[in-house]
Amino acid sequence: MNSIEKKVVTRFAPSPTGFLHIGGVRTAIFSYLYAKKMGGTFILRIEDTDKEREVAGSIEHIMESLRWLNIEWDYGPDKPGTFGSCIQSERLASYKKYALQLIDKGLAYPDPYTKEEVEKFRQDAEAQKKPFLFRNYRPETFDEWDGSKPLRLKVPEVKRYVWEDAVRGQLEAGEEMLDDIVLIKSDGYPTYNFAHIIDDLEMGVTHIMRADEFIASQPKFLSIYDALEIPYPVFVSLPPILRDDRTKKLGKRDGAKDILDYRTEGYLPEAMFNFLTLIGWNPGTEKEVFTKDELINEFDLHRIQKSGGAFNEEKLKWLNKEHLNSLSASKYKELVLKAIPAKYTGLPSFTEDRLEKLMPVIRERTHIMADVTTAFEVCEYDFVFTDPDVSLDILRFKKDPDVHSAAPRLQHLALLLETADFSSPDTIKSAVWDYAEQEGRGEVLWPMRVALTGLERSPDPFTVAYIIGQTDTLRRLQAAYDKIGHAK
C-alpha cells in the first residue's frame, strides 16, 4: 500500500540538547496540525543518541513547552506505543536488528581505520583536489562486526537520486552526495542518519516534516531506505524562519529565545501557536487571527511556502493583543491579577470596583501581560490606588505665566463635579466640557489631569475621575488648589 493511502502518522523528533527553539516549535506545530487535520497520529520522539551534547532536564522542558502550546501527542516519552519507547536510547535493540540485516546483505561493514588513517585519506583527497568520500577508501574485505568499531553503510548503488518533496516538488542530487556513512557508532548508539529511518519505519510514520537544511542529506537517507528496501514516506521540507530583516535565518545571536521565555513575558499560547503557523504557511485568505481548531481545519500541505518567513515580534505582539481581547472579562481579569505586583494587590485601596474601572485602560494599553507588570512597576497606575504627589511645575499649563492661573479653574471644576453624574467617563466629560471649551481645553483639562494623577501622561482626566470616584476626585482637586495657595 502506498504510504499516502495509510492513516497519516507524523512525528516531531527533537534532540534533548537545550531549550526548544522557535524553528523546532514551528516544525512540531505543522506536524501536529497535519496529523489532526487528517484524523491521524502525532508522535513526540526524543532523539537522544548524542549523549555528549545532551542537557539534563531537556526532555521535560520539551514536553512542558509543547503542552504550554496545547500540543498533545498520541505517543511520546511518557506514552510508549505498540512499537515500544519513543526515546531513542531505549530502542537500541531495534537499530541493531536492522544493522544485522544490512550486514547479512553485504551492505554494512565495520570501519577498520583509525582516526589517523582517516585523516591521511582526507589529506590525500585534498591534495588531489577531490572531495573526501569514505567509499573511495572502502576496504576490500570486512571483519565481523563486534560493536567495538563504527558500522558503516556500504552504499548499495552510486547513482543520481531524484525524489519528490511535498513543498519543493521534484529534487535531485548527484552521486557526490553519497557516501559510506556511519550507521552505529563505537559507543553502541546509532547516528541520526540511521536511527530516524528505523524509528519512522517501526512507528509507521507517513509524513516527515523537517527543516529544509536536511535536503542536502536526503540522498544519504534514500540510500539507507534502498538498502533496507523500505518504501519512502512523504518528505515535507519546511522553509526557514528568518530574522525580521529577512537577511538570514533566525538564530540565537539574533535574539531567538526559548519558547517558554514568551510564556514568562505574558504571551498567550494561542497567539504563539497562531503566529508560528503563519510563518511559512499561507491560509489563502487575508485572515490572520485563528483559533487552534480553525488552523486544524484550514491546514493544507500545499500552502506551505518554499521561501522563508520572517519572525516579526511586533506582529506577534499585535496577534497576542487580538487573542487577549477575545478573552472573556473574567479570564482577562484573572491574567491581569497575576501580572500586578503583590505590593499593589495588598493595598487597602486596591478594591474590586477600582480594578474593574481600570480594566478598559489596561486592555487598551496591553499587548502582553508583561506590559501590565511594567506599567505598575513604573508607577503608571499609582494614581488609582494612592494620592499623587503633585508637582507645581507640572501642574502649570505651558501657556500660563505661572501655576496660580490654574487655581480658579480647579475651583470651578470642583463646583461642576460636585453635582455631576459619575456613572461613566462620558457623563463626567459632559459636566465640564462647556467650561473647558470656554476657558480653553488645555487650560482646564491639563491641571485637572495633573491634580488627579500627578502625571504628564495618563488616561484622559474623565476616565481617571470615573476610576477613582467622585469623593477622591473632589479631594484631589482641593488638595492641588490648596498647594497652589501655599506657593509663593
Image (cartoon, rainbow, N blue to C red):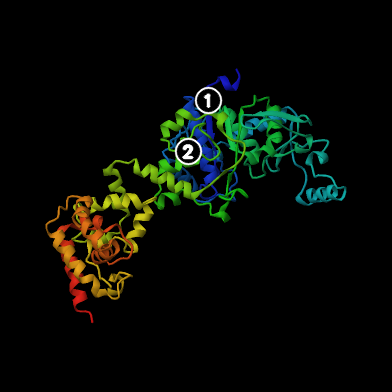
Q: Residue at x 50, y 30 (%)?
A: 299
**Labels in figure, total:** 2
Of the numbered discs 2 and 1, the one sitting upstream in the chain is 1
Name the kind of residue labelled 2 in the image: Pro
Label 1 Cα neighbours within 10 Å, binned few <14 / some 14-19 / many ≥20: many
Drawn side of residue 287 relative to residue 414, left or right: right
Q: Where is residue 146 in the image (x, y as percent from the top left)?
A: 69, 39
Q: Residue at x 51, y 50 (%)?
A: 19
Spot the residue most to the bottom.
Answer: 488
Secondary-structure class at tag 1:
loop
Cα distance, mark 2 to mark 1?
A: 20 Å
Nearer to us in this view, 85 or 298:
298
Drawn side of residue 160 relative to residue 211, left or right: right
Nearer to us in this view, 4 or 296:
296
Report which residue position mark 1 lands on. Answer: 8
Spot the residue most to the top.
Answer: 1
Report which residue position mark 2 lands on. Answer: 77
- The tag on residue 477 is none
Regarding residue 302, the answer to whether it shows in the image is: yes
Q: Residue at x 27, y 50 (%)?
A: 359
Label 2 Cα neighbours within 10 Å, binned few <14 / some 14-19 / many ≥20: some
Q: In this view, does 413 lie above or below 356?
A: below
Nearer mark to the viewer, of 2 and 1: 1
- Quarter where residue 190 is shown: top right
Q: Where is residue 381 in the image (x, y as percent from the top left)?
A: 29, 60
Secondary-structure class at tag 2:
loop
Q: In this view, does 31 lie above or below 272?
A: above
- Quarter where residue 348 is shown: bottom left
Name the kind of residue labelled 1 in the image: Val
